[in-house]
Amino acid sequence: MFLDGWLAITYFEPLGARRAFPCWDEPGYKATFKIRLSHKKGLTSISNMKFMNQINCPSNSDYVVDEFEESPPMSTYLLVYMVSDFVYTEADSENDQVKYRIICKKDLANKTEFAINLGPKALKYHEDYFDGKFPLHKQDMANIPDFPTDSMENWGLATFREGVLLIDLDVTKTVIVYDIARCITHELAHQWFGNLVTMKWWTSLWLNEGFAEYAGLRGVDFLFPESKYFQVQCVEFFLLALDFDSLQTADPLSVAIEKPDDIAPISLYPIMFTKGPILLHMMNTVLGEKTFKQGIRNYIRKYKFSNAEQDDLWSLLTEEAHRQGTLDKNLTVKQIMDTWTFQAGYPVLNVVRDYSAGTVILSQERYLSIKSNGTDNKTCWWIPINMTTSGDVNQTNATFWLNCENNNLTIPLANDNEWVIYNMQMTVLFRVFYDTRNWMGIICTLNDPTKYETIPTLNRVQLILDSLSFSQVGDMDYEITFQLLKYLKYEKDYTPWLAALTGWREIDYLLYRTPKHAVFQNNMRDMLSCMYSKFRNIDEKVNGYENINFKILVISRACEYQTKDCIQRVLDLFRKWMKSVDPDNNNIVPKDLKTIINCYAIQYGGADEWNFLWERFQRSNLTSEKNDMIYALGCSSIKALLLRYLNWSLDESIIPREYASAVLSPVMVNEAGFLVAKEFLYCKIADIYEYDQRQGNSLVEFVNNIASQMKTKEELKEFQSFIIKSSRYFKEPDLVINQITETINKNIEWTLKFYNKITNTV
């Protein structure tokens, strides 16, 4: 029982079924299940399959027994059953064979409109993509309070944490609406890829989740064709994957699972949900949409109601590619993909032109954000090579592969081309390092307002990302990078600005708590001023997913870099809301800007603003609103408030457990909050560990975020000592020490090399 009613719900992934009934609780074993549930009259039960019959319980007149259809062969972790007093909302569907319903608490039934309309359309999209009818008679979506993950793909009954399925379209931010659409399409993709065809063992979990995420992105893009959602998300995934996978301590996608305790941690790897979809997009691009889709259909058809592993998919993609002539007969998808899934990291493609000879030399090596001693010659990838030149900007087809056998290729390239650019449309996960003359040719084109758009948008994104990263590790002079970035005064697209501001943020964090931070912020204000002037009117509405993201990004950074006009506008609007007669029902803050306006009003305001927002948090009954507020309250610059707030996060009577984890993040990245968060960790680690239901995973995240802002040898020594003394709170303390050591050493190295140069260069 919970405060609003009655609910019992199972969650079996990965090893929960064995606690409910005797079974071979591994994905490779499938069986048919016939569920019978006994429950009190007045409640309702539901399971994977369609309800068949209800009888009175012979042993207790207050109870009834519900019986459900027998399931097709399925793995135990996908089984689910639920008893509740929830209500059911059914979609008006053209497909009478599949009943689609939303299940939720009665007081949330008026928030089902978006999910109930989207679900049948997403099902139809997946049926067309997989070329196969939905394999069950019904598909339910259940909204669960305090669920352990965002969502779970149980066959025929997907479950979602409150705030991830149901929304009020009048108040929910546009970005959240699209994220929920992706979550719904992701879980529905699993009904085929994961449920109908299931991995043999947890080693293939990356493929299970990676494909569902890829299909979810594609599905949202199809359902909302004007959004550019797929392109924007691919750039965000690229940013995350390039960052996560650049450390020596990074893990490969395909990880060996040897004991039960190994399973849960890999399901939390961020790389699984970012790098996985990028690699599948690479194969879709290389093989072609027609080949890739048919290969997926062949895979589903061959292994339905059974199990498979990644080699089975690679084999069928190879067969289809050879049949359609989209892959050389001497090459297999396995040869290519094994280098991307069994190895950690990603390559940098070195491009060195010999201008006198009219040639270019291509080679690869692993990219590392901290230079190792010597080159890593053992790691190499199959890289599809395509390129464009200043004379031919439309060449996008892959012309050949760079691999271990031909890792130092010399090919002809006419020397009358001003520049050459590789990895068209940024479809493959690698960086590209050019010789200085080629960089200067690119910079010349970018800084010409009549020519910069001849370089495709996604390649402008990669040029920004790569130049900033190469400067950060010392391979490229920051002066060249900032010459390139000057072109941004002409840039009108969101994703290049996202790339630039993400790269700048790393520098910003490294300059926190230093005398030169103010100088850097002043330079950033100047560079951002042209775009801020476009978006400075907070009340002016913009339309479209990409433009809304653009406005959020620009206003956020303008306030972060202390643009006086931005700060004043935010405070004026927030204080106007504070003075309204009924602030809980009359929130005048634009819904898409609530997070950033709340955050910067709290940062630049005082105790009155903080107390006002805390009261709004306590009074709100909307999960999305409460999430925004709980984050913003951590943006304060008042250290006493932050310390009290962190302590509250360990008291469930003050901050409900489902919101507690959101307290830490804004405090840790807050310049004023870093030292507060660090001392809180040092003093309260036992309490944090005890409160952490995920057995230390969020604690590791806390530690890594603290480490990311340390940049001296003294801080490294102090933090290593702390982790060693606190080793009992970490499942793998040696791994944690290696991770924080690598991160802090990277920051130390950057500070020694660039601290005295960076502010003079920008």
Image (tube, rainbow, N blue to C red):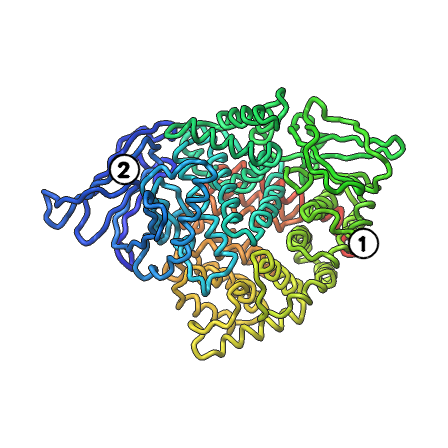
Of residues 98 and 245, the one nearer the viewer is 98
Disc 2 target residue: 20
Residue positioned most to the right: 356
**Three-letter amino acid code at the position of disc 2:** Ala
Q: CA distance from mark 2 to mark 1?
A: 66 Å
**Three-letter amino acid code at the position of disc 1:** Asp
Decide if residue 139 is on the left or right side of residue 742: left
The answer to whether 175 is drawn above or below residue 475 in the figure is below
Of residues 450 and 694, the one nearer the viewer is 450
Decide if residue 237 is on the left or right side of residue 155: right
**Residue 565 place in picture, x, y as percent:** 66, 71
Label of residue 448 in the image: 1
In the picture, the quarter occupied by the C terminus is: bottom right
Mark 1 residue crowding within 10 angstroms, few (<14) / some (14–19) / many (20+): few
Q: Is residue 329 visible?
A: yes
In the picture, the quarter occupied by the N terminus is: bottom left
Mark 2 residue crowding within 10 angstroms, few (<14) / some (14–19) / many (20+): few
The residue shown at (54%, 51%) is: 225
Label of residue 57 in the image: none
The residue shown at (83%, 42%) is: 418
The answer to whether 120 is drawn above or below residue 312 in the figure is below
Decide if residue 242 is on the left or right side of residue 149: right
How many numbered tags mark residues here? Answer: 2
**Residue 151 place in picture, x, y as percent:** 41, 46
Of residues 368 and 557, the one nearer the viewer is 557
